Amino acid sequence: MLLLLALFLGTLAGCGVWLLLRARTFDAILGLTLLSYAVNLFIFAMGRVKVAAVPIVEKGVTATLVTTADPLPQALVLTAIVISFAMTAVLLGIALRAHAQGGSDHVDGSG
Amino acid sequence: MFNHLPNHLLVLPIVLPLLVGALLVLLEKAQSRWVAAVSLASTLALLWVAVQLLLQAHEGSVQAYLLGNWQAPWGIALALDRLSALLLLLTALVALASLVYALGGDDRQGLHFHALLQFQLMGLNGAFLTADLFNLFVFFEVLLAASYGLLLHGASAERLKASVHYVVFNLTGSALFLVAVGLLYALTGTLNLADLAVKLPQLGPENARLAQAAVLLLVVVFAVKAALLPLYFWLPATYAAAAAPVAALFAIMTKVGVYAIARFSTLFTGDGTGNLAGLLAPFLPPLGLATLVLAAIGALAAQRLRGLVAYLVVASAGTLLLAIGLGTVGALAAGIFYLVNSTLIACLWFLLADRIAWARGADDALSPRQLQHGWGLYGALFFAAAVAVSGVPPLAGFLGKALLLQAAGSTPLAGWVVALVLGSSLAVMVALARAGSRLFWKAGPATALRMDPPRPAHLTALFGLLALLLALAVFAGPMHAYAQATAQQLLARQPYIDAVLDARPVPPAYDVRQEMRERGELK
């Protein structure tokens, strides 16, 4: 489980960085999206990976990371998702405008 | 503390621009002529709040404000110490100057200038006040989102290109920020800065490397914002492409990165932090010096006045990070003194460069061209601003650098610091002398365009900033005393930690649960 998650995270981040280094705005935006997926999963995993546990304290059970999932990373991820989603939309808008004006989606506006 | 109401003034620098920004969006839609007046009134009110907060912080204690009345570290807290208060005031001053200048016509070049400015102020003030790492991330995103909009203000092709670079660069930085936040949370289970400062030194040796990696990653993220080598390459293009009032406002944005590095380097890697103590000392001073050298070369090689000014911003960032990296009380105090001066100068330079370019027919290339008006006026301002930025007496830029050299004298890097700081000052002076002689003394062809003389708003902003710089030189004594006290407070660590962690929620004036329990409705 942990190994799978780690491999998956690494692949996502690696693909994201590779796409980000290409000089086309479309590729860079895709790369940023993959990178933000990787980061969100990473934050989620930092609250310790726990299967079949709810982030709610139940009566009679002392809430520790053994019995319950940590709710805080889930809240953090939710915020991070909203922010990265909105920022991607802004970047898409700017990239489209640059493409319309320059006639190219090269990040330097030519080529 | 239970009988004492929280100081709500602390949250005003965030709430006021937020509400006014939202109101301005509506007013703009209704095409009201009150937009500029409301924006100006709000910024003046913000200035008043910042002055009040500075006076409170000057009394010496750190104040904490519990958002939502939740005790730290479970809820998010704001904290006001001398450094935060000083930066709040600086933000308000820079914003006011940019806004007044923009009223000369720049604010009508595109949509939503005033609303975006207010949202930018909200993000800046929030970043300076918050005592929570994730909250800092959120305020960073708020100020960046507003800055994307402002950078595109009055969009030209060059601005669009610079925007794409700037946004991609900052989004990547945000991803790294989140990785660092995740790591710190996994290690300590907290994101409150004061709580982190307590818990990070308690980590066992098995986690020391991971904690160091997380803190260094945070510093990388802020070094992007603060424009430290090798992460400053986005800055000259971005700042040179932005509209003048926007670039002037951005002068405070690099200082957010500087502020965050100052906060983290003292709180997490200061004395008594165990595995993390002295973590940044081997990296920051050499990188700051290298930034300074490259910025001086960039200034010498600049082909346009705006590009030259952007490298002056990089040079000031290098000097500041050098001061933080040296980490002694004297060096930090010199850095804080220099920070105020360099921010105001950068703001003045961007506005002045725009006026000079305008008088030359909207051309700021450093080649001979005739000035249509304001030869004496702009020449005098250029001279005063050049004196202020290159660190020549009698203005305060000289005092900042002299204090830094004096403080560096007792550190192992003394020789390098003295040689490179003085060398780069000389290079900047040469670059400015060369630019000034080309702009003002060489006769060149006039453009066919007829340009308007400066409006009262432009002159008010320029002379206001110049008056502030002169005041800073005259009142250098009290200012340096404040900087010294700020540095001592930062290095002491404990006042900040105690203030945030000891703040107690206010008991409710009216307890619904108690009443329900008495009536037997709640078991």
Image: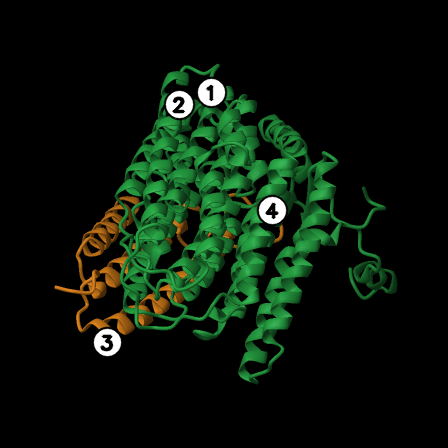
Chain colours: A orange, B green
Residue B54's disc is: none
Q: Residue at x 63, y 42 (%)?
A: B471
What whole-number distance in Å separates the C-alpha atoms at marks 4 and 3? 44 Å
Taking the view exactly as shown, the residue that stands out farthest to the right is: B518
Q: Which residue is mark 2?
A: B417
Residue B282 screen position, x and y as percent:
37, 23
Task: Choose top left, top right, bottom left or bottom right for residue B48.
Answer: bottom right
What whole-number distance in Å separates the C-alpha atoms at marks 1 and 4? 27 Å
**Chain at tag 1:** B
Residue B490 screen position, x and y as percent:
59, 31
Q: Secondary structure at mark 4?
A: helix
Q: Which residue is mark 4?
A: B468
Q: Which residue is mark 1?
A: B408
Contact check, label 2 and label 3, Cβ < 8 Å: no
Contact check, label 1 and label 2, Cβ < 8 Å: yes
Dot placed on the residue nearer the N-terminal end, 1 or 4: 1
Q: Which residue is mark 3?
A: A100
What whole-number distance in Å separates the C-alpha atoms at marks 1 and 2? 7 Å
Around disc 3, counting alpha carbons within 10 Å, would you say few (fewer than 14), some (14 to 19), or many (20 or more)?
few
